[in-house]
Image: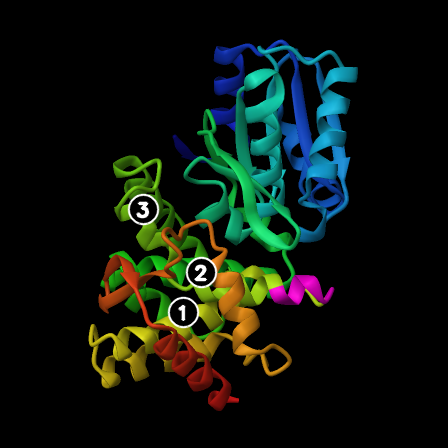
Amino acid sequence: MISILDQNFSQLNQFLNTLKPSKLFILVDENTHEYCLPTVLGNLENEIPFEIIEIEAGEELKTIETATQLWEILSEFEADRKSLMLNLGGGVITDLGGFVASTYKRGIPFINLPTTLLGMCDASIGGKTGIDHQFLKNIVGTFAEPEQIFVFPYFLRTLPFVELRSGFAEMLKHGLIADEKHWKDLISIENLDPEKIYPFIETSMKIKQKVVEIDFKEQNIRKTLNFGHTIGHAVESLFLQTNQLIPHGEAVALGMICETQLSVLENLINSETAKNIIEKIRKFYPYISINAFSTEQILALMKNDKKNSDGKISFSLIDKIGNCQFDRSVSEENIISALHFYQNLG
């Protein structure tokens, strides 16, 4: 399922030569077109006809309008059900490309070749595809597994630092919810750079893949992967509404701080453990002011989260470093208290 590519992409070539798709559609944005596509094309060794489809970069393009354009392009190029979509990019490309592939002609196969740390360790794994609608993240989507995920870690060298840091938040989350050693390894890094992160990418990917294999449709343990996301997604959506986009990982870091404090308020961890976790997260991430938003606005978006049921806001909260509980209903009073806690850190 997950292949770490060598320098000549032999695993990808072997896969394509075995699958023998009728046509290959490579979805890129303008950044991956410039920085990553030449490496991929320079290493392809087959006679499969291909087309490059380029979209603009950015979360704001992950919409039904973009999906419609992509369906039309596939139709114009006479893509059939033996065609293969190769999603070359970060989380937006793998989310959007997977959604388009899984719905075009009721589903064509696709593979992910993530180019960002967020894509490698989170978005490309697990078969969740999706688009945003009315500023609600991933509110429309499918469960559809890629045929394969190929990772070329050296693509991280093409990333701006802010994108590298964004993806690192998901790695920290994996440690907090499932692997204390992974958490300790990650927080021991002094300065984030690709070379220091390379050794831990595969561990993070395997943590997520293992959870997904147990619970593909997110009925139980997969919900633990939402730690930091209930509040994080709400804040991210509010910034999206004001056209002030913040990186996903920075929103998740904010969410993990708030939800760590929630874990204290819910008597799952003690304040000393929480203080240690929060200090380590803040070592890597800047404070984001949420004073422009009311607690009512944040609560309203959390109530609309697709993970909720019966009108209750559901959280995944840690009960120790390396373990997480899911389906925790939390009072609005405690949520507001956690939000105020974060605001006071500024």
Left or right? Give the position of 200 relative to 249. Answer: left
Q: Which of marks 1 and 3 is nearer the N terminus?
A: 3
Closer to the camera in the image, 77 or 100: 100
Residue assigned mark 1: 256
The residue positioned 60% from the left and 83% from the top of the image is 291
**Residue at disc 3, secondary structure:** helix
- Residue at x-position 61% and y-position 16%: 105
Most frequent secondary structure within the magenta stretch? helix
Picture quadrant of residue 230: bottom left
Check the image and report above or below for 227 versus 57.
Answer: below
The answer to which image quadrant residue 213 occupies is: top left
Please rate how many residues cluster around mark 1, counting C-alpha atoms within 10 Å: few if below 14, some from 14 to 19, many from 20. many
Q: Is residue 58 visible?
A: no
Q: Is mark 1 on a helix, strand or loop?
A: helix
| Numbered badge on residue 222 | 3
The residue that label 2 is drawn on is 229
For residue 149, the mark is none
Classify 10 Å Cα crowding around label 2: few (below 14), some (14-19), many (20 and above): many
Q: Which residues lie in the magenta part?
A: 238-243
In the picture, the quarter occupied by the N terminus is top left
Please state which amino acid type lies under the numbered disc 2: His
**Residue 229 within the segment the image draws in magenta:** no
Q: Position of residue 60 (x, y in %)?
A: 71, 52
- Whether residues under marks 2 and 3 lie with C-beta atoms below 8 angstroms apart, the answer is no
3D distance between C-alphas at marks 1 and 2: 7 Å
**Mark 2 → mark 3, Cα distance in angstroms:** 13 Å
